[in-house]
Amino acid sequence: MEQNFIKASVYPQNHTFQPGGQPVVFKVTVINDSEQHADFKLEVIPAGGNPNIGNQWYRLSPEISAAKPPGSSTEFQIIIFDSPIPSFVGTATLRIRIVSPRLRQERTLVVYLRIEADDRVKAVSVELPVERFQVYPRNTANIAVRSRNWSHKPVDVVLRLVGIEASWLNDGVERRLLLEANAQVETIFQCQPPSSNQALSREYPFTVEATSRDGLSHSPQGILEVLPVGFVEFKATPQQQTIPRRGWWIPDWKSNSTTFELLFKNVSNLQQQVEIQLQGKNHRQCTCKISPEYAELAIGETSKVKLEVKTKRPWVGWFKTLKFDAKAILSDQRLGGTDPTNQALELKVLPIFPLWLQLALIALLGLLLSLILRSESVAHTDSINVVRFSSDGYSAVSGSNDGRIRSWEVRGTELTPLGNDEPEKPKGILGVTSGEVLSLRFDPHKNNRVAAGMKNSVIQLWNVAKREREAELKVTDFVGKTDKVFDLVFTQNDKKYLISGHPNRKVLVWSRNSATEEFKAEPERSINVDFDVYSMALSSGDNTLAVAGNHKSLILLDLNKLNSLPQAKNNLTQDDLVKNNLTQGKFVVADEKSPYGNDDRVFSIAFVPKSSDLLAIADSNGYITILDYQCQSRIKSNPQQPFYQKECGRDRWKAGEQAIRSIAVSGDGQKLVSAGDEGRIIVWQLTPEGKRSSESVKGKQIKKIEHIINSIDINSQGNMVIIGGEEYQQTQKGKKYKPLPITLN
């Protein structure tokens, strides 16, 4: 029997409904028990009812779920506002059909609905002669509404069309009618959807709400379907590739793959997914990897799909040319296929040993040997994600997308590689990790040891002096298979805890019995927050842990109360934080009326030294905020209620037009340094009250580069800043990325 990967439950299962009374509301929870992303949609079917009635008697939210990863759950809300079986009194059986297009499976749940008699007498009836309308963007649909007065007296009736944007209705959403006795009137609502990039192609359920003096008139429902228009443009860049990429002249026997970039521009009003298939006479000689497997095509945007093609290369002989087509298949075929449907691709495969190499093999052996044994250049080969000074300021470390941690000695105003040049440990390399390095922190107990957080759910501890890995912590069991370690902090006083932050809304607290022991393989505490974690900071004395992330959210946790919890309470939910008073305050770093969402993030936070209540915050909209994080005790008594920056902000200013990705505060609390996507390094002078000084309102720009800056740090003396990002030097051997030290006056 085939395994069903859709798990579902409904609560409650029994309901009572009286037509014209309060609607019935219940929830259905669906769990993705497969090993791939999946989306779901629901349908409610009454047993013995009219199969053509559709969903005119209930509403569903959401109408269809977005594709979610394995193990995730989706909660649907079903609202029954009319009888599924007209004129029926008794208990009706409702089947809830759950379907996943990707899994190609379905599951059925049962709900029992007891329908009571409707003994009201209506003076006014309202109906839709046509219940379904189809219209293209910028065209007009005339929605006719028929009203009938069954009484012997004139009746005032107000018709209001809800469910459709008011701006789509040419003459407004409301009509006022005077119905004469026993009269019938037909009213027209003219609906004109806007342009295709504003009117998505989907069904828009609407209701005509009619109110009169008896308050018992009908509220008929209809559907406006905006029809799809436009097309999806398909390009491949480049259309010809060579393996190896360097061509004939550079020997490269390891390369057996190359990547084509497929571009899809959705110039339509239809949300799409695209799947790629290879076809053609030579496609069976290749193996391909497509990322992502199902690409989401956002309306009006260009999406990229990477097609990695691998093939076997001959050792000797002439090159061969493989020709094949990349065919794009859209999830919704109402607009046909992409334009064009296929892209013709060509792959030139060179032999491992070309003719000239065979003739000059003896001479090349010496060259190859020197290339293999040559020491590695003292620089990163990809973007730098994080930089950190040691506590004494005499050394620094940097982590990069190339998977390497490099150590540097600070000599005056320069950085020089740390360590001796050895065959297996080239100069300057602290460690070669198993993934992209996203975060670094020095262990306060051993200033010569560094914790590294990586993209592949691993935390590694490296000895700087020996350049050896001493321990590895795997967070897979707590944050998912492919989660990232965005930030790390050590407790300074007891030196017993290492805290890691993750974008799956978790904070993990790793412990050791004493500062001389290693951390446990399993975290002491697992804390759930309600946003993705991008940055963390510890106050002096280790009393308060600040955690920040998307939705411009910030939460302050009391570490003292966390330590006093029972050992068994190691997975702390939001309810646990409230119950045990672990939350010192919640903040939204935005104005109360300003819109903010998942892409609005707090990228960097830092407590201001020499102050007891100031926290500096940098966000994705280019703002820096100095927050009085203890103001909540003076404003409100409920620390679980989020505060907006206007309530608790000491100062807030626009530091750039683009995201500020990193800030650092000097040890005396008087200098704040910021950097981000504009490549500007700016110094701001702060007063003891946490505001910009009068001579530093606009800040002082001390450096401008042409690339994004991902991370900055300031040394303990407060006279030097180190930056790392996407700035590189182009050499004959490729791009070289190095941290940049800058002195402060």
Image: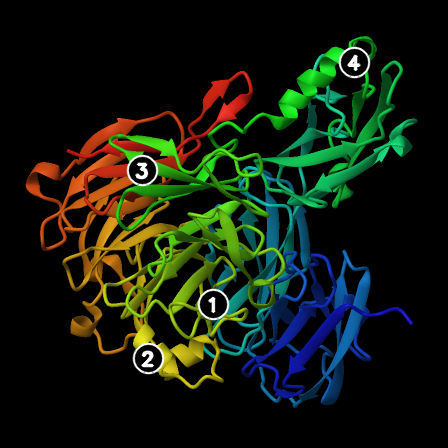
Image position of 40 with respect to 29: above or below: above
CA separation in Å, label 4 and label 1: 52 Å
Mark 3 packing: few (<14 Cα in 10 Å), some, or many (20+)?
A: many
Residue type, mark 3 in image: Ile
Q: Mark 3 touching mark 4, by CB under 8 A? A: no
Residue type, mark 2 in image: Lys
Q: Disc 1 on helix, strand or loop?
A: loop
Q: Is residue 241 left or right of residue 659?
A: right
CA separation in Å, label 2 and label 4: 70 Å
Q: Nearer the viewer, mark 3 or mark 2?
A: 3
User: Tag 4 or tag 2, which sits nearer the N-term?
Assistant: 4
The residue that disc 1 covers is 519
Residue type, mark 4 in image: Leu
User: Picture coordinates of residue 596 (x, y %)?
Assistant: 39, 53
User: Picture coordinates of residue 408 (x, y %)?
Assistant: 38, 38
User: Tag 1 or tag 4, which sits nearer the N-term?
Assistant: 4
Could you say which is closer to the camera, residue 531 or residue 592?
531
CA separation in Å, label 3 and label 4: 46 Å
User: Tag 1 or tag 2, which sits nearer the N-term?
Assistant: 1
Mark 2 packing: few (<14 Cα in 10 Å), some, or many (20+)?
A: some
Image position of 358 with respect to 27: above or below: above
Q: Nearer the viewer, mark 2 or mark 4?
A: 4
Residue type, mark 1 in image: Phe
Q: Which mark is residue 722?
A: 3
The residue that disc 4 covers is 361
Q: Disc 4 on helix, strand or loop?
A: helix
Regarding residue 680, the answer to whether it shows in the image is no
Could you say which is closer to the camera, residue 214 or residue 321?
321
CA separation in Å, label 3 and label 2: 36 Å
